[in-house]
Each structure stands twice: as C-alpha cells, then as structure tokens.
C-alpha cells in the first residue's frame, strides 16, 4: 500500500484542526464552513477515509506510528556481521 508523506499528513491535519476551531467559533459563516469542509475532504482523500473525523483519527494514528517506527528500526540497524564475505568478494 502506498503511504502518504508524513509531512503532508501533518500539514493537512494542522489545517483541518485550525479550520475546525475557526468553524466552531463562527458556525454561521458559510465561507468558513466551506473551507473547513474542504480541508476535511482533502484529509479524507489523503487518508483513504469517507468521514473527516475518521480521517483525522487515522492521520493522528499514522503520525504517531511514524514517530515510533524510526526508533525501533534504529535499534536493529547494525553493520554487516564480521567474518562473512559475499560470494562476489571471493
């Protein structure tokens, strides 16, 4: 499965949350509501979800997993085992 870029997910999630706050402060402003819904749609497409709430939750989970993953991978990275030679190095 092709995963979205971590930076893009973070940027779209910040945009969605920012417009969510503005929309909650001005619920009758149709321009604000439209922009909020547009940011939710973008997040839905990016995360492959049908609902903006689900997309936001999925984005937060994805970013959390991406933060945890490099630490686990860094522990397992070591140089090549000493004493072993590749067949090409004979």
Image (cartoon, rainbow, N blue to C red):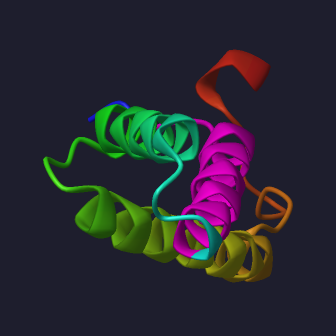
Q: Is residue 29 magenta?
A: no
The residue lying at 84 percent from left, 63 percent from top is 82
Give the camera-side residue of 20 and 61: 20
Q: Is residue 89 left or right of residue 2?
A: right
Percent across and percent down for residue 56 are 42, 65
Percent across and percent down for residue 62 are 48, 65
The residue lying at 63 percent from left, 55 percent from top is 19
Give the camera-side residue of 29 and 40: 29
Percent across and percent down for residue 60 are 51, 73
Q: Is residue 13 magenta?
A: yes
Percent across and percent down for residue 6 are 66, 48
The residue lying at 73 percent from left, 69 percent from top is 70
> From the viewer's perspective, is residue 55 above or below residue 43?
below
Q: Quadrant of the N terminus?
A: top left
> From the viewer's perspective, is residue 55 above or below residue 38?
below
Q: Is residue 54 visible?
A: yes
Q: Main secondary structure of the magenta part?
A: helix
Q: Is residue 90 visible?
A: no
Q: Is residue 72 left or right of residue 32?
A: right
Q: Which residues are magenta?
A: 3-24
Extreme front residue here?
28
Residue 20 image-quadrant placement? bottom right
Extreme left residue here?
50
Give the camera-side residue of 53 and 25: 25
């Amino acid at each position: 499965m092709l995963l979205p870029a971590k930076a893009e997910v973070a940027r779209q999630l910040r945009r969605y949350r920012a417009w969510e706050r503005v929309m909650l402060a001005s619920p009758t402003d149709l321009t604000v509501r439209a922009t909020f819904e547009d940011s939710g749609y973008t997040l839905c497409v990016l995360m492959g979800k049908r609902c903006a709430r689900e997309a936001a939750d999925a984005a937060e989970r994805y970013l959390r997993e991406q933060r945890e993953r490099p630490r686990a991978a860094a522990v397992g990275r070591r140089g090549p085992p000493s004493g072993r030679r590749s067949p090409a190095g004979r």
